[in-house]
Image: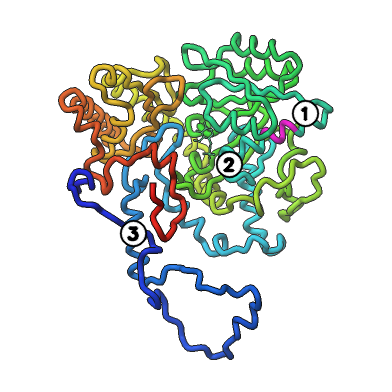
Amino acid sequence: MPSEAASGIAFREPPIFERGAVGRRGHSTSALDVPEVDVAAALGGLLREQAAGFPEVSEPEVFRHYVRLSQWNYCIDSQFYPLGSCTMKYNPKVNEWAARLPGFAALHPLTPPHLAQGALELIVRLQELLAEIVGMDGVSLQPAAGAQGELTGLMMIRAYHGAQGRSPRKVFIPDSAHGTNPASCALNGFEAVAFPAGPRGVVELETLARAVQAAGDDVAGLMLTNPNTLGLFEPAIADLVQLIHDKGGLVYGDGANMNAVLGQARPGDVGVDVMQFNLHKTFTTPHGGGGPGSGPVAFKQRLAAFQPGPVLRREGEAFVVDTARPQSIGRVRSFHGNFGMMVRAYSYIRELGPEGLRAVSELAVLNANYLKRKLEQILPLGVEAEVLHEAVFTDRELEQSTGIKTLDLAKRLIDYGFHPPTVYFPLVVRGALMVEPTETETKQTLDAFVDAIAAIKAEAEADPALVKGAPHLTRLGRLDEARAARKPRLRWTPEPASD
Ligand SMILES: Cc1ncc(COP(=O)(O)O)c(C=O)c1O
């Protein structure tokens, strides 16, 4: 299908508020067989003076509108989605089935614990499994995203220092880290101290030692992503942890990239004190559309007293909600967190077992290295190193010779049927394209992706305008991203905003 730009036809999908007609209905109900309530009398002053202005639409109108919108979207269920650092893997449908079982999906969050023992058991069992997987002593499933897990973990570190009558402020973060790391520090009243990763893309002990030395007694901790955002394992991690512990600090492990080390290495075994999982990456919750996520924190015993409350735990044969936690940082999420994600993760872990989880990381690493070997013949690597789950390439040379920018290449990939990789991140690589294939892709898909990049490179050299104008085969052509970011229209208004 040619894009709007290519065909000259203006496609317009009016929002639901601009559809329908007064009195049109999408449902039919039987006649009342009970006395009608006088709504005005019942609501008194709370009654609206004017109708709320909701769309009045038929069932086909509303259904088709949303189906059409969903078909314009790119999704992992239809195509390869190699978005680096996001672990966009295919989510087995059996986990969706489990999450939709009425006993789980329809359970009211305020159901008293003695009537919700099955759900509480699942939560406690998942806490235990996750703790085992990363070598920690406990897990709280409350945080609803990776970033919220970071925030929670740092709150626990702050509470730990506070309980010892200390209030150090500096948290060291390498410059290759995800932006949420410094943001979580700042939100927590810590000072994020950035230091450079070395030329090999990993943290060097001497660099951190110098930074820590300069901080004196003000060392609250270190935040380290392992494997890091270049897809590299941090080889000095045990020494880095020791250095921070010697200064009285604690180590926060960003576990967003756990997919690469599942069943191979446990952060707890090298001394990491607290970390988050991104269940929506590693443990198969569909993500990418801003939907519910889950970022549990795992911690060592010395931080257990500070975990979010209430705490769910076993008591004999029963599963209880423990609210007597005087040192807890308190609740970070309503109820017990995003329960649907927990059911999916539990079902996935039980389905795969230890051998299956190990195979996940082995295949994820194999796929990334296969892709790296083939793709580095077309685009140079951002950093020459052995990678784990993802590889970062740079198209700087291509830009210099053809004028094609990273974004152009990314947009043209859409015409070839692939979601673009992460671009311009990590910031330490100019013209970065960060590719994470995950374990769920076949060799054929990876080969087709590499062929597409090779074809786009040839196009860039022969016909740069073709690449610069991409995408051409999508419903809408190139969108004005700067305008969308600077002047977002997030709410429908009757009159289109004039700008
Ligand atoms: C390394 C890393 N840390 C933290 C996060 C934040 O996770 P979330 O998007 O669930 O808040 C991400 C997300 O991409 C990440 O890649």
Q: Secondary structure at mark 1?
A: helix
**In front of the other: label 1 or label 2?**
1
Question: Is 311 covered by the magenta stretch?
Answer: no
Q: Earlier in the sequence, mark 3 or mark 2?
A: 3
Q: Residue at x 67, y 63 (%)?
A: 111
Q: Which mark is residue 161?
A: 1
Position above or below: 144 against 221: below
Question: In screen coordinates, is 251 left or right of 475?
Answer: right
Nearest to N terminus: mark 1 or mark 2:
1
The residue beneath circle 3 is 14
The answer to whether 71 appears left or right of 248 in the picture is: left
- Spot occupied by residue 405 in the image (x, y as percentages of width and height): 30, 26
Amino acid type assigned to the residue bearing label 2 in the image: Gly
Overall secondary structure of the magenta section: helix
Residue at 61 percent of width and 46 percent of height: 126
Q: Residues within 10 Å of mark 3 (few under 14, many from 20)?
A: few
Helix, strand, or loop for circle 3?
A: loop
Q: Amino acid at mark 3?
A: Pro
| Relative to 292, 366 lies left or right | left
Q: Is mark 2 within 8 Å of ligand 1?
A: yes
Q: Depth check: give the residue in front, 218 or 140.
A: 218
Start-end of magenta stretch = 154-158
Q: Quadrant of residue 205?
A: top right
| 3 relative position to 373: left or right | left
Q: Which residue is mark 2?
A: 295
